[in-house]
Amino acid sequence: MVEQLLSNPDEFDFLLETHQQIEVQLAQQDHRYTNSRRQLVEVLSKAGHPMALPNIVAADPALAQSSVYRNLNVLVRSGVIRRINTGGDHAYFELAEPLLAHHHHLICMSCGAIQDIYLTSEVEMLVDRNLAEVALESGFTPIYHNLDLHGHCANC
């Protein structure tokens, strides 16, 4: 792991900055950034895509499933990790914004595949504007948005 990071200084800098940001975020909520939580963040960061609990555990044999489950709950509640519900057997997890670039998902209801999609800045501004109008009419104060489009992928 360390050898891989040293061979890619950009990834090392990203992870270091990510860990520092998460440590501050957790401390503000009276949580510690333990080694287990750090390992979990590294697994999700290296994967580069949402992962289900069994895949997270398989990616790092040092992680115990019960510990991963507890830590995921803390990290989701703290806003470090985002839970993505596909309607299938497993929820999927990824680093939350702003740790990752703003994006949305295409979720296949047949096989559970999740694809990250990035909207153009023009489309994103239109979405923001329309959602802000709807929220204002309802007396709602939006913090952020994410769109998960559910349907069937090309393989299904």
Image: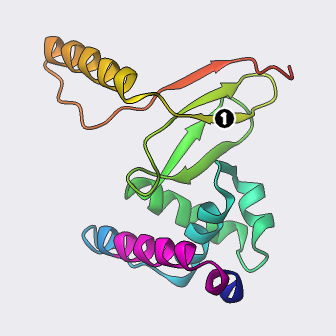
Q: Secondary structure at mark 1?
A: strand
Residue at 63% over, 20% down: 150
Locate residue 111 relative to residue 127 in the image: left or right. Answer: right
Above or below, 52 against 115 in this view is below
Q: Determine the main secondary structure of the stretch shown in magenta.
A: helix
Locate residue 8 relative to residue 112 in the image: left or right. Answer: left
Above or below, 78 against 133 in this view is below
Query: Was residue 156 drawn as part of the magenta stretch in this picture?
Result: no
Give the residue pinned by disc 1: 115
* Amino acid marked by disc 1: Gln
Closer-to-camera residue (41/71): 41
Query: Was residue 9 drawn as part of the magenta stretch in this picture?
Result: yes
Closer-to-camera residue (153/35): 153
Closer-to-camera residue (36/145): 145
Residue at 65% over, 67% down: 43
Residue at 21% over, 21% down: 132
- Magenta residues (range): 5-23
